[in-house]
């Protein structure tokens, strides 16, 4: 077992950073930094931190909520936030929670 943080970033399909969606940009940035195990969840509905209702619509996904979640040790967490804080034009809401993490079971991971 190890101690670290689960960091979940909240965005929407329509939010862009440069020529990419924020969630896709974030996943690629984490991978380029050598951070593994990030997951992107596309959500049905949500209420944003400014109290706006966001939802998937049959004809348009631009308002659809998206979460990117990753578990990091303390050093990687500091490195990720240093990288994100230095990124011009990026504004990304997140939740950072202390966690204990590890692997369970007797098998090997594929």
Image (cartoon, rainbow, N blue to C red):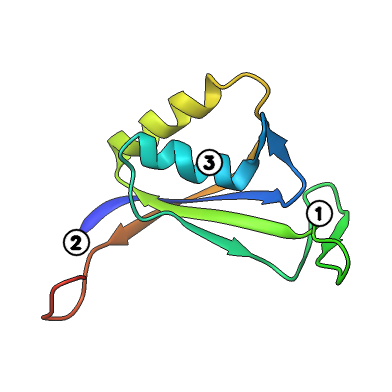
Q: Earlier in the sequence, mark 1 or mark 2?
A: 2
Residue found 68% across the figure and 67% down from its top: 43
Residue found 37% across the figure and 29% down from its top: 79
Q: CA distance from mark 1 to mark 3?
A: 17 Å
Q: Is residue 3 left or right of residue 43?
A: left
Residue 62, which numbered label? 1
- Tell me whether the residue at label 1 lies in contact with that at label 2, contact meaning CB atoms closer than 8 angstroms: no
Q: Which residue is mark 3?
A: 26
**Going by the picture, which residue comes out furthest to the bottom?**
106
Residue 16, which numbered label? none
Mark 1 vs mark 2, foreground winner is 1
Q: To which quarter of the image does residue 60 belong? A: bottom right
The C terminus sits in image quarter:
bottom left
Find numbered disc 2 in the image and state the secondary structure of the residue it sits on. loop
Q: How many neighbours does mark 1 have within 10 angstroms: few (below 14), some (14-19), or many (20 or more)?
A: some
Q: Is residue 91 left or right of residue 86?
A: right
Q: Which residue is mark 2?
A: 1
Mark 3 vs mark 2, foreground winner is 3
Q: Is residue 20 above or below residue 14?
A: above
Q: Earlier in the sequence, mark 1 or mark 3?
A: 3
Q: Is residue 96 left or right of residue 51?
A: left
Q: CA distance from mark 1 to mark 2?
A: 39 Å
């Amino acid at each position: 077992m190890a101690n670290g943080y689960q960091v979940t970033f909240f965005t929407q399909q329509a939010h862009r950073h440069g020529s990419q969606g924020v969630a896709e940009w974030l996943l690629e940035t984490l991978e380029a930094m050598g951070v593994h195990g990030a997951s992107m969840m596309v959500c049905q509905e949500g209420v944003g931190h400014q109290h706006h209702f966001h939802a998937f619509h049959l004809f348009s996904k631009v308002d659809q909520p998206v979460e990117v979640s990753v578990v990091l040790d303390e050093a990687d967490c500091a490195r990720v936030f240093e990288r994100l804080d230095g990124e011009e034009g990026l504004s990304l809401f997140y939740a950072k929670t202390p966690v204990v993490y590890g692997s369970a079971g007797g098998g090997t991971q594929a």
